[in-house]
Image (cartoon, grey):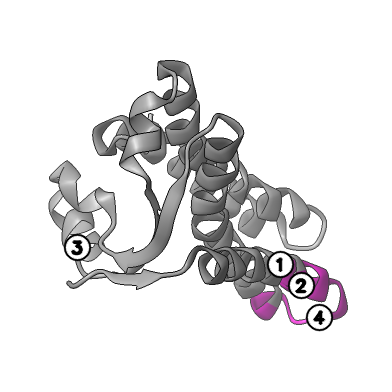
Amino acid sequence: MARIKIPLGIGHLIEVVGTGFVLCLIYSTFEISDVPLRFLLYLISWGCLVFFPHCLAHFIVGRLVGIRFTNYSIGKSGIAKIRMPFISAIASKVPLLTVNVDRTSLKVASRGGRAVMFASGAATSMILPFFATVASFGRLPMSLTVFLIILSAANLAFDLYYSPKAGDI
């Protein structure tokens, strides 16, 4: 898959709008009485919280520690590298928004700064999906909320396993 370059401003806009969309979805659940639709909205919110804030966290933390970025791009996920047959096959075909680091600034940044910048995206993708789960408490039947808890815990476990292999931690 060819990498499509996207200017930083447009990439930031995509990330912020995607994250804002989550807040709108969660807020809209208060007006919806249909439980399956409400669950679907929480599930979509959960997925958006895994993906949209990830690169933005890398960017914000990176800039705070002196790392610059060149652009965003659409390319393959790093998950394809981890050699898990089913997951790697899907990850190699699904386009993903990534933020690209300026290699010169990365080299001069402190080791701790680099580590924090790389870990920030993974930490964001592990923690923020719990927000949708917590928001579902009292709004969904307990079995569906438990499903979201299990999904969030599985995402956390997977990211803890995957992120060191992909270079985020």
Say if mark 2 contacts mark 1, CB within 8 Å. yes
Crowd tier of the residue under label 1, counting other residues whose Cα lies within 10 Å: few below 14, some 14–19, many 20 or above:
some
Mark drawn on residue 24: 2
Tell me how far mark 3 sits from mark 1, CA to CA: 27 Å
What residue is rendered at 48% in x and 33% in y? 117
Residues at circles 3 and 1 in contact by the CB criterion of under 8 Å: no
Q: Which mark is residue 7?
A: none
Residue 77, position as x, y percentages in the image: 29, 56
Q: Nearer the viewer, mark 4 or mark 3?
A: 3
User: Which residue type carries mark 2?
Assistant: Cys
Which of the two marks, 1 or 4, is nearer to us in this view? 1
Is label 1 in a helix, a strand or a loop?
helix
Q: Amino acid at mark 4?
A: Ile
Question: Where 98 falls versus 26 (above or below)?
Answer: above
What range of the chain is rendered magenta? Answer: 24-37
Q: Which residue is mark 3?
A: 92
Point out the tag, 4 or 3, that comes first from the N-terminus. 4
Q: CA distance from mark 1 to mark 4?
A: 19 Å
Q: Which mark is residue 32?
A: 4
Query: Which residue position holds label 1?
Result: 20
Query: Label 3 sits on what residue type?
Result: Ser
Of the image marks 3 and 1, the number of the one nearer the N terminus: 1
Name the front one of labels 2 and 1: 1
Secondary structure, mark 4, is loop
Vertical comparison of 137 with 73: above or below:
above
The residue shown at (19%, 72%) is: 2
The residue closer to the viewer here, 77 or 7, is 7
